[in-house]
Image: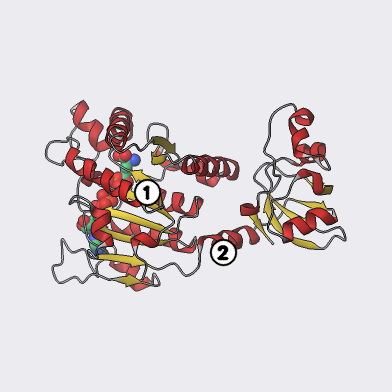
Amino acid sequence: MATLTDAKRLVVKIGSALLVDRATGALRDDWLRALALDVQWLKGQGTQVVLVSSGSIALGRGVLGLPATDLPLEQSQAAAAVGQIRLARAYEDVMALHGITTAQVLMTLEDSRDRRRYLNSRATLETLLALDALPIVNENDTVATDEIRFGDNDRLAAQIAATIGADQLVLLSDVDGFYSANPSDDPSAIRYNVIDEITAKIEAQAGDAGSGLSKGGMKTKLMAAKTATAAGCAMAICHGFDPRPLQRLHNGAPATWFSATLDPQTARKRWIAAMKPRGTLTLDAGATLALENGNSLLPAGITAVAGDFKRGDPVAIADPSGHVLGLGLARYTAEETRTIQGHHSARIETLLGYPGRAALVHRDDMAL
Ligand SMILES: Nc1ncnc2c1ncn2[C@@H]1O[C@H](COP(=O)(O)OP(=O)(O)O)[C@@H](O)[C@H]1O
Ligand SMILES: N[C@@H](CCC(=O)OP(=O)(O)O)C(=O)O
């Protein structure tokens, strides 16, 4: 079974009920201060951490004097606008005490559906992690309309975990795991320790959210588990209300773990391999060898470009004899590729008139 400190890359989702006091609508400062200790401890062990934090609507509604009931969309968006700025500030203040730089990342569902935006958000998150910043992600509630929103951060967190190839996702909740029935309605319900496969029986056992502040309940947590585990990321649901929940989990606090059956790299390569190519890049012998040695594909090694593709589209990669080696996601359009093919990466800016990325297909975006 997975343990927390095995994770190289960890995504932690924090539900509204943990951050915001239900009775007063105020931020739970002590809890947040203790969370910073958990983050510092994990980073000290070499784990890269991304937080997905809810709480903007719960915080903002208190400030605006809105009721703690379901709000109309415009009011919840207004509450999110007021709450998000406070939430970001609170994280910044508390993490700065430990020398941790925070970064606010606001996402919409479209950012994960559109491949270009998906690749851009992935590159930004990768860069933030490389620069040792702590990304704090939330849905961009103020602009996301009903049809195009995640609506809950359980699925957003799973999407982020899949996007950055995290190996573990922890959902800090107001319940210590997934039970055979909603434990607040059925005291005889039993908690699962490990779920290897999400069967129809398990799906039938998932209920809605219990508290007025929360959105998802177990239904969205199961959807999150499907997304995460299919991307090679193990997922835990555990109780987050008491201080230092991550250290508690590490020390054996009760939880439900959803197992991942493959690693994130393999999952990503399978995902790419299943795509339909929009064009073909033919390589020279040197580039073919470079790819076989695990390198990215540079424009210099391309001898021919077929098809019409946009940035982020899948393209087939062929050796000099036309034999298809595999698939990759292009970082340039077909037109741009034709302009820079056969040229050294240092000349890209001169040829295109704007700076570009050195690799045409990054090795992480390739399935050979
Ligand atoms: N099978 C189940 N096992 C555990 N909790 C369940 C189950 N079905 C429904 N729930 C409810 O889901 C709640 C947790 O989800 P939610 O309220 O959305 O929390 P969060 O704010 O962490 O997203 C639990 O408190 C419980 O009331
Ligand atoms: N984006 C919303 C969070 C929605 C949500 O999933 O809430 P929760 O069930 O408490 O994790 C907010 O910041 O209020």
Residue 72 versus residue 229: which sits nearer the camera? 229
| Looking at the image, residue 242 lies above or below residue 137 | below
Q: Is residue 271 left or right of residue 148?
A: right
Residue 338 versus residue 50: which sits nearer the camera? 50
Residue 299 appears in the rendering: yes
Label 1 environment density (alpha carbons within 10 Å; few <14, some 14–19, many ≥20)? some
Quadrant holding ligand 1?
bottom left
| Looking at the image, residue 284 lies above or below residue 24 | below
Instruction: Give the amino acid type for the residue marked by disc 1 in the picture.
Output: Lys
| Looking at the image, residue 71 lies above or below residue 317 | above
Residue found at x 79% / y 53%: 287
Residue 78 versus residue 281: which sits nearer the camera? 281
Q: Position of residue 89 (x, y in %)?
A: 30, 30
Residue found at x 35% / y 38%: 100
The residue that label 1 is drawn on is: 43
| Looking at the image, residue 97 lies above or below residue 186 | above
Q: Secondary structure at mark 2?
A: helix
The quadrant the C terminus occupies is bottom right
Q: Along the polypeptide, which appears first: circle 1 or circle 2?
A: 1
The residue that label 2 is drawn on is: 266
Q: Position of residue 82 (x, y in %)?
A: 29, 27
Residue found at x 75% / y 62%: 325
Q: Is residue 342 left or right of residue 3?
A: right
Residue 249 occupies which quadrant of the picture? bottom left
Residue 190 occupies which quadrant of the picture? bottom left
Q: Is residue 199 left or right of residue 287?
A: left
Q: Position of residue 151 (x, y in %)?
A: 36, 44
Label 2 environment density (alpha carbons within 10 Å; few <14, some 14–19, many ≥20)? some
Residue found at x 28% / y 32%: 93
